[in-house]
Image: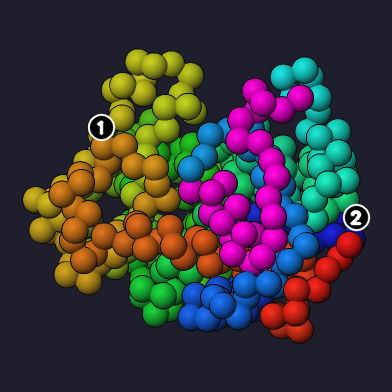
Amino acid sequence: MNGLRHLMTPMDFTVDELERLFDKAIDIRNDPAAYRHVCDGRILATCFYEPSTRTRLSFETAMLRLGGQVIGFADASSSSSVKGESVSDTIRVVSCFADICAMRHPKEGAAMVAAAKSGIPVINAGDGGHEHPTQTLTDLLTIRSLYGSLSGFTIGLCGDLKFGRTVHSLVKSLVRYSGIRFIFISPPELRMPDYMRDMLDLKMIPYEEVIRLDDCLPDLDLLYMTRVQRERFFNEEDYVRLKDFYILDREKLSRARENMHILHPLPRVNEISVDVDDDPRAAYFPQVQYGLFVRMALIMTLLDMTDDHMNKGLLKW
Ligand code: CP
């Protein structure tokens, strides 16, 4: 796509490239001062047509901590999309102002449409129920850091597996590593889509589908909880019926292994009780911090910043 490197899906990076990205993220965490001026003079645009706390703020913080600056909109209603401007036109305009863009949109494929017309790297910050690649980079880095490896574990993914873009991106990424067993925990209405299960069948990756969380908890090395997403439902009645299907609380957690890590892309609603937050297995707030470091590493990678740029603040303009 126009000779630029974009991020539409985590599969846009090879496993080796991901390793380098994660190593860079850890280096940034260990020595943030060394990266303070890497992006001096660079501008990140955040074009968010859908609400966000973590993704938008962590992208903006990432660019600010690299010495760059940030422009953008946090709400479609404050952009000219309400006047009918297309995503293609918006990105052509944003390309005149910024060096890189993170875009979130409720429609699947919107970031891809933008990338096709963009003069700057575009990062898919979530497109409808399709993909959320930077959440997956966050999740993979968190798992690698906590578990010590991206291979050889049993992971339970629980909640909205039908509309959950984070679980789709994560599963597609994890199948590239060895010895991973998936347990999909959902009500039948929110089970993993056919195309995902077909992909796993084709690759002969072991997975099970269960309805009750309690039954499989003792088997898990990692539990990835997700929220039932009100905004993806076509009617309120179905949402209300399913929204509290899973609630992980201290009592349930007593059935899990002492070293099982609990991840969640957040936001959380009721699916993890706040009394779990102090449990050493709860990793969802440290996970947010890993998201910042990996987005800093990603911005550097897509802007093709080498270590030569460190501490020098090389200007593009
Ligand atoms: N995990 C995540 O995408 O959170 P936000 O919707 O707050 O960005």
Estimate the spatial distance between the alpha carbons at disc 1 and disc 2, rounded to whole Å.
Answer: 45 Å
- Can you give x and y, in whole percent of width and height, for residue 49 in the image? 64, 32
- Can you give x and y, in whole percent of width and height, for residue 177 in the image? 51, 72
Q: Which residues are magenta?
A: 54-80
Left or right, residue 194 beside residue 71: left
Q: Is residue 315 above or below residue 262?
A: below
As for residue 206 lying within the magenta part, the answer is no
As for residue 72 lying within the magenta part, the answer is yes
Asked if ligand 1 lies within 8 A of label 1, the reply is: no
Residue shown at 52% from the left, 61% from the top: 292
The quadrant the N terminus occupies is bottom right
**SS of the residue under disc 2:** loop
- Can you give x and y, in whole percent of width and height, for residue 58 in the image? 53, 54
Residue that carries the numbered disc 1 in the rendered image: 244
Identify the amino acid type marked 1. Answer: Asp
**SS of the residue under disc 1:** loop
- For the question of whether residue 200 can be seen, the reply is no
Q: Is residue 256 above or below residue 48?
A: below
- Can you give x and y, in whole percent of width and height, for residue 125 in the image? 61, 47
Residue shown at 43% from the left, 67% from the top: 142
Numbered label attached to residue 2: 2
Name the foreground residue: 137 vs 101: 101
Dot 1: few (<14), some (14–19), or many (≥20) neighbours within 10 Å?
A: some
Left or right, residue 159 beside residue 25: left
Dot 2: few (<14), some (14–19), or many (≥20) neighbours within 10 Å?
A: few
